[in-house]
Image (cartoon, rainbow, N blue to C red):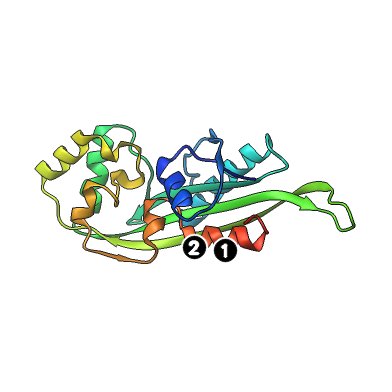
Amino acid sequence: MIILASASPRRQELLRNAGIPFTVQPADIDETPLAGELPRECAERLAREKALAVFRRQPRDYVLGADTIVVVDDAILGKPRDTKDAVRMLRMLAGRTHAVITGVCLVGKKVASGQWPVVSDCEELTASATTLVTMCDLSDDEIREYVASGEPMDKAGAYAIQGVASRWIPRIEGDYSNVVGLPVALVYGMLRERGAV
């Protein structure tokens, strides 16, 4: 069985659309970046911590953790703390190209060699995908109206590419599903490599 260590409805929808069966058990971890941590390292570490937190409770299943961050000027933008923070993030992104990085980690039982599988430990695969996203200039009124809609409040970088914000994104370079919250092709390859699908 595959367990998604995330409550994100967007990640769940992406997995369902790809025909990957799973159940959900969200992980509750501190998502604060570490001092001096590089963006890719941060996304991969958080994905790993989420996967391991759930795997400790479900050691006979495959657990998939993921974490998406937005990076501009070497600053890591996670989910906004409040509306003021969402406005700040959108002002940083407006009229520029930024990176969206999603770290993913698949943790599963380690099987000892021999006729009968024996769970001796866990093994993990950790990777990440990066997509470059260009956002149009935004007026203060557009930003205020968008933040008031509530859409940005649980999204890394304070926007949803699949929602209202799509009208401000003329270009991406890379995997679209990565920006939504899960690089599906990368995840499917990891699951296939481990025999989970």
Residue that carries the numbered disc 1 in the rendered image: 189
Q: How far across and down, in percent of the image, does residue 106 sit?
A: 61, 52
- Count of residue discs: 2
**Left or right for 40, reference 110:** left
Rounded to the nearest whole Å, what is the CA distance between mark 1 and mark 2? Answer: 6 Å
- Secondary structure, mark 2, is helix
Which disc, if any, is residue 119? none
Q: Amino acid under label 1?
A: Gly
* Quarter the C terminus occupies: bottom right
Q: How far across and down, in percent of the image, does residue 94 sit?
A: 20, 53
Are circles 1 and 2 on residues that touch, CB within 8 Å? yes
Count neighbours of disc 2 (C-alpha within 10 A) and say few if under 14, some if 14 to 19, many if 20 or more: few
Which disc, if any, is residue 185? 2
Is residue 37 at least partly visible in the picture? no
For the point 36% across and 40% down, which residue is it?
A: 79
Q: Amino acid under label 2?
A: Ala
For the point 42% across and 62% down, which residue is it?
A: 130
Is residue 177 at least partly visible in the picture? yes
Count neighbours of disc 1 (C-alpha within 10 A) and say few if under 14, some if 14 to 19, many if 20 or more: few
For the point 34% across and 63% down, which residue is it?
A: 132
What is the residue that sits farthest to the front in this orientation? 19
Figure quadrant of residue 169: bottom left
**Left or right for 185, reference 113:** left
* Quarter the N terminus occupies: top right
For the point 53% across and 58% down, which residue is it?
A: 187
**Left or right for 146, reference 52:** left
Please name whichever residue, 86 or 193, is drawn nearer the observer in this view of the structure.
193
